[in-house]
Image (tube, rainbow, N blue to C red):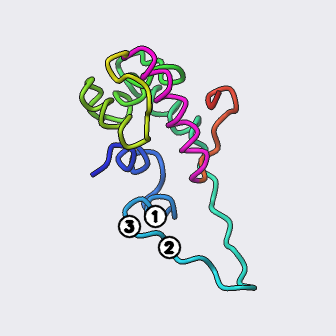
Amino acid sequence: MSIFKAILDKIFPSSHPAVAREASSTAAPAPAGGAPVQAIPAVDVESILNGLAAKSPEKLNWKTSIVDLMKLLGLDSSLAARKQLATELHYSGDTNDSASMNIWLHKQVMQKLADNGGKVPDDLKK
């Protein structure tokens, strides 16, 4: 399973279209000519993550740290796992520069969550 798929699974309900789309290896066909496009239900990412943080015995700064975000979600936050996530998200920088990679990863994950129907504050995507 991809790491980004695991992130989606932890934040979005299993019935959410983004979870089903990431699970599928092929893209869904485009709707026919005049067919209405169904809106993707919004998921309040910040609220969900704040709720998890409130229950966590560890103080995790998920709003700025990809490591803390992954820990909060109960995922492997090792350098190897973050390098795998960087590969999945098409990071073009040097994965040995973990500080730069981590900053990029956090912003990309937040943007991808928003792109998939997550309600993410603008300051977390920049």
**Position above or below: 105 against 29:** above
- Write down the residue under mark 1: 21
Q: Earlier in the sequence, mark 1 or mark 2?
A: 1
Specify whether 114 is left or right of 14. right
The answer to whether the residue labelled 1 contacts the one labelled 2, judged by CB atoms less than 8 Å apart, is: yes
Chain part drawn in magenta: 98-116
**Residue 40 is inside the magenta segment:** no
Give the distance between the C-alpha atoms of the residues marked 1 and 2, in whole angstroms. 7 Å
Circle 1 SS class: helix
Q: Amino acid at mark 2?
A: Ala
- Write down the residue under mark 3: 24
Q: Quadrant of residue 73?
A: top left
The answer to whether the residue labelled 1 contacts the one labelled 3, judged by CB atoms less than 8 Å apart, is: yes
**Position above or below: 115 against 60:** below
Q: Residue at x 27, y 32 (%)?
A: 81
Q: Position of residue 96 (x, y in %)?
A: 31, 18
Specify whether 45 is left or right of 21. right
Q: Position of residue 41 (x, y in %)?
A: 63, 60
Give the distance between the C-alpha atoms of the residues marked 3 and 2, in whole angstroms. 8 Å
- Write down the residue under mark 2: 28
- Indicate the quadrant containing the C terminus: top left, top right, bottom left or bottom right: top right
